[in-house]
Image (cartoon, rainbow, N blue to C red):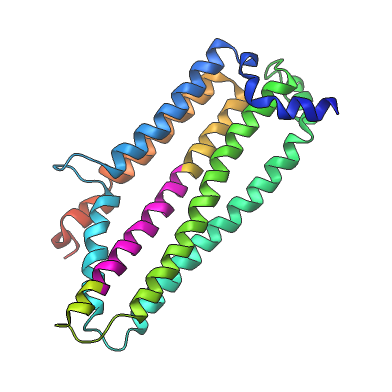
Amino acid sequence: MEQAMVNISLPFALPALSWADGAALSFLLLAWFAVGRLIEHPPKRNPSVSVLMQDYRRQWMRNVITREPRVFDSQIISNLRQGTAFFASTAMIALGGGLALIGNVDRLAGLAREFSLGQDSNLLWEIKLIVVLAFVTNAFLKFVWSHRVFGYCAVMLGAMPNEGNSPLAQRRAAQAATLNISAAKAFNRGMRSVYFALGTLAWLLGAVPLMLATCFTIAVLLRREFGSATRKALADPEHLG
């Protein structure tokens, strides 16, 4: 009963955090929000990969109207759904493992003490693991929603007339593009949560490692969205030729 009461009152147990842990956690959450905001709403002169892909998704759906048969397009949607299903399953497995670890946090704390990783209380270890699981849970929910919306996009493809000049076909293409972009946005948010969940694991080593891991996560995400060869190819299709 006492253990259950501790778990229930965990959201109100933030005083267990030291000032360093609190600062590192605040930095992590701020970075997660700011990076997501910057990627989804970048400067117009320097769009991110995610924003650039939106134009390609719209172009894809416009081309679907006159493509017959549409087996190729259905295969692409199927592959996208398989990817989201894989990551959703992986996130669920990680979530189950994390919950099991929280239930046996004494062994984790004892192992940390043996390796001289600190003398943190069991409550603090639980907080650290819960933050990791919060990111994993968010990722799972985003992947599941992305999987569903890609399914809606597939249905919209089936409802699209073949006549390219048909107003209904143009409207269905626009709707399918919106659904496709929405599904991709949810998937990207899930992937960012996975990145930050992995970075948050560094908190098990202390507040400073968490800050360093957060900085590294920020650098990886921003480089891939704004400074990668992939972005260069998307921004300038002639680069591929």
Is residue 64 inside the magenta stretch? Answer: no
Residue 80: x percent and y percent? 43, 66
Examine the image and state in which quarter residue 198 appears. top right
| Residue 227 is at least partly visible in this image | no
Vertical arrangement, residue 67 with respect to residue 17, above or below: below
The image quarter containing residue 178 is: bottom left
Query: Residue 162's image quarter?
Result: bottom left
- Does residue 158 sit above or below 125 in this rendering? below
Q: Is residue 97 above or below residue 210?
A: below
Q: In the rendering, at what x and y percent does residue 20 appear?
A: 53, 13
Q: Residue at x 46, y 27 (%)?
A: 28
Please give the name of the residue rendered at 23% of the width and 80% of the height, measured from the top-left corner: 65
The structure residue drawn at horizontal position 55% and vertical position 19%, both measured from the top left corner, is 207
- Toward the front, the furthest residue is 168
| Residue 237 drawn at (x, y percent) | 17, 61
Quadrant in which the N terminus appears:
top right
Residue 30, x across and y down, in percent = 41, 27
Let me know if residue 84 appears in the view: yes
- Which residue is found at the position 13% from the left and 62% from the top? 238
Q: Tell me which segment is drawn in magenta.
A: 172-192
